Amino acid sequence: MPQLPAPDYPAEVRARLEADAAQLVGRYPDRRSALLPLLHLVQAEEGYVTRTGIRFCAELLGLTTAEVTAVSTFYTMYRRKQGGDYQVGVCTNTLCAVLGGDAIFGALQQHLGVGNGETTGDGKVTLEHIECNAACDFAPVVMVNWEFFDNQTVESAKKLVDDLRAGRTVEPTRGAPLCTYRETERILAGFPDERPGAVEASGGAGPATLAGLRLAKGEGAPRVGPPRPAPPAQTSEEGEG
């Protein structure tokens, strides 16, 4: 059984978190509505939602630790144990799976030597399968700290995790430049991304996503797949039929 009550943060850490939390809580007319961003805040501090983080949120919002625990264990974006600097999520839902997602996930498990939800020994990569990355038109899709890596293959996914572990620069297919898991969590808590050019680089939906909208507006949608082969030339005999 865990020690009760949970230990508190060191005084200087708690003071810093309280100052950040005051900004978040002040955005809501009801204090308890700030629970989700506060959970991201404490996760940014320690890499996952610890018992100390749960105690902090409960005391700040006037909730019980049971209420905070119920929320933190309901949403999969909140970790229950320490993970890596880069959370690599492979979509294994229907479309991604049949287009290669299952093969990618299996290959990465073998390549990294970890199972679902496990972290490499160097603490760099946590691998998990995700039910849907909401990017079916770019399947199969891998996400790293919630940034998109579209149209992946087994080999490109292996290179991706190798680059992450080696500290090489990795550029998402779409979205802002990659940052560590804890840095991502602070942004998700509601604090601005202060990296130069990061917000401008976020961009929007890709051509495949917008194809239906263009068609609905009567515009020609660009092709996003491989070019179709030209039809065979008609012979004179066929033309006389």
Image (cartoon, rainbow, N blue to C red):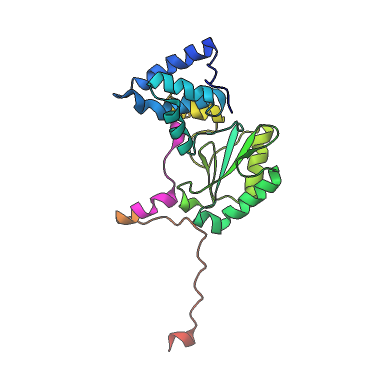
Residue 208 located within the stretch drawn in magenta: yes
**Closest to the observer, 109 or 219:** 109
Return the x and y of residue 239 as percentages of the image width and height: 44, 85
**Closest to the observer, 134 or 61:** 61
Return the x and y of residue 206 as percentages of the image width and height: 44, 46
The answer to whether 122 appears left or right of 184 in the picture is right
The answer to whether 241 is drawn above or below residue 172 in the figure is below
Quarter of the figure with residue 99 = bottom right
**Closest to the observer, 148 or 189:** 189
Q: Residue at x 57, y 53 (%)?
A: 101
Q: Residue at x 52, y 14 (%)?
A: 13
Magenta segment's dominant SS is helix
Q: Quadrant of the N terminus?
A: top right
Q: Determine if residue 193 is in view.
A: no
Q: Determine if residue 94 is in view.
A: yes
Q: Residue furthest top?
A: 11
Quarter of the figure with residue 121 = top right
Return the x and y of residue 172 as percentages of the image width and height: 54, 39
Return the x and y of residue 108 as percentages of the image width and height: 65, 47
Q: Residue at x 51, y 75 (%)?
A: 232
Q: Quadrant of the C terminus?
A: bottom left
Residues drawn in magenta: 199-213
The answer to whether 99 is drawn above or below residue 118 in the figure is below
Residue 150 located within the stretch drawn in magenta: no
Q: Residue at x 42, y 25 (%)?
A: 64
Q: Residue furthest front?
A: 1
How many marks do you count on the picture?
A: 0
